[in-house]
Image (tube, rainbow, N blue to C red):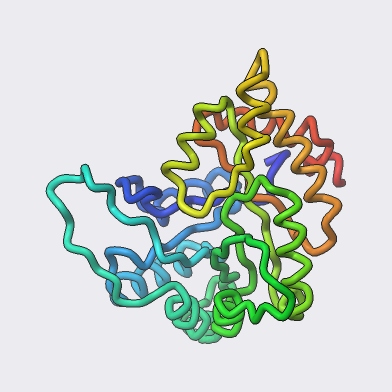
């Protein structure tokens, strides 16, 4: 709680079975931590998704990230029946209708988010994907993890030209890596994650790759803090989660220092 404003609870990440995000969100609230609950369109019909949104309201979970979801891996047996009743933009629109209904969102208005992928668009880029999500009701978006700060700066500049930054907050995703092998695993198993070759080289050449990974995260947090359009950072770690508060503390950007 001294280091982060909220914790994102992913919904069956990588198509693997995990605890219900609503149950995990309730546990975080009981512990005094603000959860951001992720709901995935994949393998749920709209009745199930509406039920989960009502559950979020009843539990007092207000921050919700609505995503398409990850494909079930090929080695998952027996194979579940694939369902894609609504897409992420449609789900955001549904949740936004519920957000405006005082009889439903009685415990506080939903704060709705989505996910986008950072890239280097050309001038005049229409930003169709994110525009549709914002028009549907998204108030914030996470970027898929991007460790290429130059690319992210270009993306944010182009996004600023569309005036969308006046209507939603952008939270930049980054990965705290512990080795070159960890980086290769993330690239293979996390679609849309961007890890430049120079980051992998730094980890490969480091005497202490874990320490180097923390230092890379520190540098990137400091760079993100200088990008005026970035509302925050979403840090993920595929291995040692305890390295996250260490990196935040070393960056000088933890909540205690901010206060």
Judging depth in this view, the residue of 239 and 57 nearest the camera is 239
Of the 4 image quadrants, the one containing the N terminus is top right
Q: Position of residue 60 (x, y in %)?
A: 52, 63
Q: Residue at x 35, y 46 (%)?
A: 19
> Where is 255 relative to 109, above or below?
above
Q: Residue at x 49, y 82 (%)?
A: 93
Q: Quadrant of residue 122?
A: bottom right
Q: Position of residue 246 (x, y in %)?
A: 70, 29
Q: Residue at x 61, y 80 (%)?
A: 131
Judging depth in this view, the residue of 202 and 211 nearest the camera is 202
* Left or right of 166 in this view: 86: left
Q: Residue at x 53, y 80 (%)?
A: 99
> Where is 202 relative to 143, above or below?
above
Q: Quadrant of residue 3?
A: top right
Number of marks present in the image shown = 0
Q: Position of residue 227 (x, y in %)?
A: 82, 56
* Left or right of 211 in this view: 166: right
Q: Position of residue 197 (x, y in %)?
A: 62, 37
Judging depth in this view, the residue of 201 and 257 nearest the camera is 201
**Residue at the outermost left position:** 78
**Residue at the outermost top position:** 207
């Amino acid at each position: 709680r001294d280091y982060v404003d909220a914790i994102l609870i992913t919904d069956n990440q990588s198509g693997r079975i995990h605890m219900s995000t609503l149950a995990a969100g309730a546990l975080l609230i009981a512990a005094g931590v603000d959860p951001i609950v992720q709901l995935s369109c994949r393998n749920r019909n709209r009745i199930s998704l509406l039920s989960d949104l009502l559950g979020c309201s009843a539990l007092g979970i207000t921050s919700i990230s609505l995503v398409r979801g990850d494909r079930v891996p090929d080695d998952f047996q027996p194979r579940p029946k694939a369902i894609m009743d609504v897409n992420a933009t449609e789900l955001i629109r549904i949740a936004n209708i519920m957000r405006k209904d005082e009889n439903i969102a009685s415990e506080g208005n939903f704060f709705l988010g989505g996910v986008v992928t950072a890239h280097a668009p050309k001038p005049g880029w229409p930003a169709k994907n994110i525009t549709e999500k914002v028009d549907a009701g998204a108030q914030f978006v996470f970027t898929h993890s991007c460790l290429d700060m130059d690319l992210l700066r270009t993306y944010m500049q182009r996004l600023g030209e569309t005036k969308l930054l006046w209507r939603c907050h952008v939270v930049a995703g980054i990965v705290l890596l512990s080795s070159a092998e960890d980086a290769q695993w993330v690239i293979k198993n996390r679609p849309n994650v961007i890890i430049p070759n120079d980051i992998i080289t730094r980890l490969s050449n480091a005497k202490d790759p874990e320490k180097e990974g923390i230092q890379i995260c520190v540098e990137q947090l400091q760079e993100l803090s200088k990008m005026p359009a970035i509302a925050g950072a979403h840090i993920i770690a595929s291995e040692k989660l305890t390295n996250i508060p260490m990196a935040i503390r070393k960056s000088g950007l933890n909540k205690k220092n901010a206060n």
